[in-house]
Image: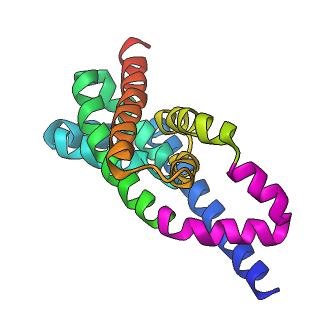
Amino acid sequence: MEEVKIRRKKLIRDAGIIAISLTIAILIHQLEILEGFVQHTAATYFLFGTFLAGILFASTFTVAVATSIFLILGQAHNPVLIAVVGGLGALVGDTVIFKFLKEDLVHDFEYLEVHFGKKIAKRIFHSKLIFWFAPIVAAIMIASPIPDEIGLIMLAGIKLKYRQFFIISFLMNTLGILVISLFARFS
């Protein structure tokens, strides 16, 4: 029962952080003062700011803010440069998340097995279909501005090697950031 309370508190805390992040992202675009500040700061510290936004792009809690920053950056700067530098930042963020998820994944699977039955969990997580499609679905999730953590859990679950993970993370985040930057440029 104690574990359920802890999980519930964590869920409420995480939802609150996501709500704050979404509010900040909306405020960046609604309040001209904040948008002007981001534009001025981005012009002065463009590469550093883009790299930092890339790190923010990797987390559920900050993806909305990072997307807002990339939309602003994409209006004034080279979208390809934004994508490459932001992709490197996102790779750093994903690597930190992946490291923690990979170590905690065993505990998550054990929790699922206890609550959903060993047969069901074993069939789902050890099926060949999941093994082949997980990297594709994970890559799409990493490229999109939805939480990378879901895709990272999938990659950790199939025991992806770090070198493969680095390539997928960098390429897919770079692609996602490029799409956002191009959208900002041409909209």
Kindly identify the residue that appears in the image at 43 percent across and 18 percent down. 183
Kindly identify the residue that appears in the image at 43 percent across and 30 percent down. 176
- Relative placement, left or right, of 181 versus 15 is left
What x and y, as percent, mark residue 19? 61, 55
Q: Say if the magenta span includes residue 103.
A: yes
Question: Residue 71, can we see it?
Answer: yes
Outermost residue on the bottom side: it is 2
Quadrant in which residue 141 is drawn:
top right
Outermost residue on the left side: it is 44
Q: Give the quadrant of the N terminus.
A: bottom right
Kindly identify the residue that appears in the image at 53 percent across and 41 percent down. 26
Q: Is residue 79 above or below residue 145?
A: above
Q: Give the quadrant of the C terminus.
A: top left
Q: Nearer the viewer, residue 136 or 143?
A: 136
Q: Is residue 111 above or below residue 43?
A: below
What x and y, as percent, mark residue 153? 56, 53
- Relative placement, left or right, of 36 versus 187 is left
What x and y, as percent, mark residue 105? 57, 65
What x and y, as percent, mark residue 32? 40, 36
Q: Tell me the magenta residue range.
A: 102-126
Q: Nearer the viewer, residue 56 or 41?
A: 56
* Type of secondary structure dominating the magenta stretch: helix
Kindly identify the residue that appears in the image at 77 percent across and 58 percent down. 121
Q: Nearer the viewer, residue 47 or 28?
A: 47
Q: How is the image coloured?
A: rainbow
- Relative placement, left or right, of 42 versus 62 is left
Image label count: 0
Question: Residue 53, can we see it?
Answer: no
Q: Say if the magenta span includes residue 144.
A: no
Quadrant in which residue 20 is drawn:
bottom right
